Amino acid sequence: MTAEREGRDVADGLELKRLYEQRFAGRTEYRTKVWQTLCAQMFSRWIRPTDSVLDLGSGYCEFINNVTAHRKLAMDLNPDARARANADVEMVLHDCSTPWPISAASLDAIFSSNFLEHLFDKATVSKTLKQAYSSLKPGGTLVAIGPNIRYVGGAYWDYFDHHVALTDNSLAEVLTEAGFTIEKSVARFLPYSMSEGSQRPIALLKLYLKLPFAWKIFGKQFLVVARKPSN
């Protein structure tokens, strides 16, 4: 990494630190409960306890801290991420669009939540997904959720750090271009925000996850599951 690139990454990380401190202030406990529920009821079907898992764009590490896995890694540029990660999480402060400091074909699964839309442009998204493909074992899985601009509309741009507009279809297309096979694509999954605004009872979230028909009414985030071919 050049000194110029390293300096830019540090500056970007500090900007993220300030932005997320303001955005998520006072919500840590509630967000943790949300992610404990999501991991237990939904994402555990794609993440096995024996897996090596990377949380791509880990933010405050709510997913990786609460998922059960043999080896847990988190990648982000926000320097706060290291302090938020549990002791069993390997933190990687790195620009995800450049070659990853992770061995090729070493991961069983990669998870990404509300991250790809924050990358600077479509080319960066494509480069990141190609790095993900390289780091996954044959048969490895990538699980991504994020706001679907088809249903969010103009509110998508209420977050200043949203740069790339994505739908379930456009993400599936770029994943296919990177070499993945699409295993599952849900246009409407979670509401736009599960842990901002009013703090709804966790029991309501548990019920919601069991009622896919409700997703078609309230869901504004997509769920896309892609697999690296085994051969």
Image (cartoon, helix red, strand yellow):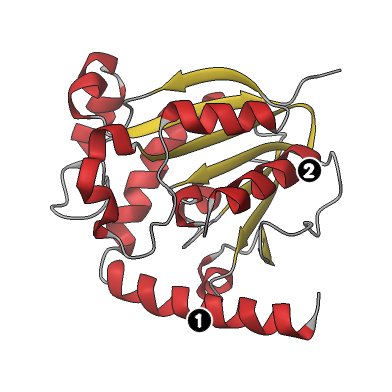
Callout 2: few (<14), some (14-19), or many (20+) C-alpha neighbours within 10 Å? many
**Which numbered disc, 2 or 1, marks the residue that appears first in the sequence?**
1
* 86 in relation to 5, above or below: above
Secondary structure type for disc 1: helix
- Left or right for 191, reference 137: left
- Left or right for 2, reference 49: right
- Left or right for 179, reference 200: right
Residue furthest toward the left?
198
In which image quadrant can residue 147 be found? top left
* 216 in relation to 154, above or below: above
In the foreground, 97 or 226: 97
Residue furthest toward the top?
213
Secondary structure type for disc 2: helix
> Identity of the amino acid at label 1?
Leu
Residue 126 appears at what percent x and percent y? 64, 44
x 52%, y 57%: residue:
119
Residue 165 appears at what percent x and percent y? 40, 45
Residue 200 appears at what percent x and percent y? 15, 45
> Identity of the amino acid at label 2?
Ser
Residue 163 appears at what percent x and percent y? 42, 56
* 135 in relation to 175, above or below: below
x 30%, y 19%: residue:
210
In the rendered image, which residue does mark 1 sit on? 14
Is residue 221 in view?
Answer: yes
In which image quadrant can residue 13 be found? bottom right
In the foreground, 63 or 225: 225
Q: Quadrant of the C terminus?
A: top right
- Left or right for 35, reference 110: left
In the rendered image, which residue does mark 2 sit on? 135
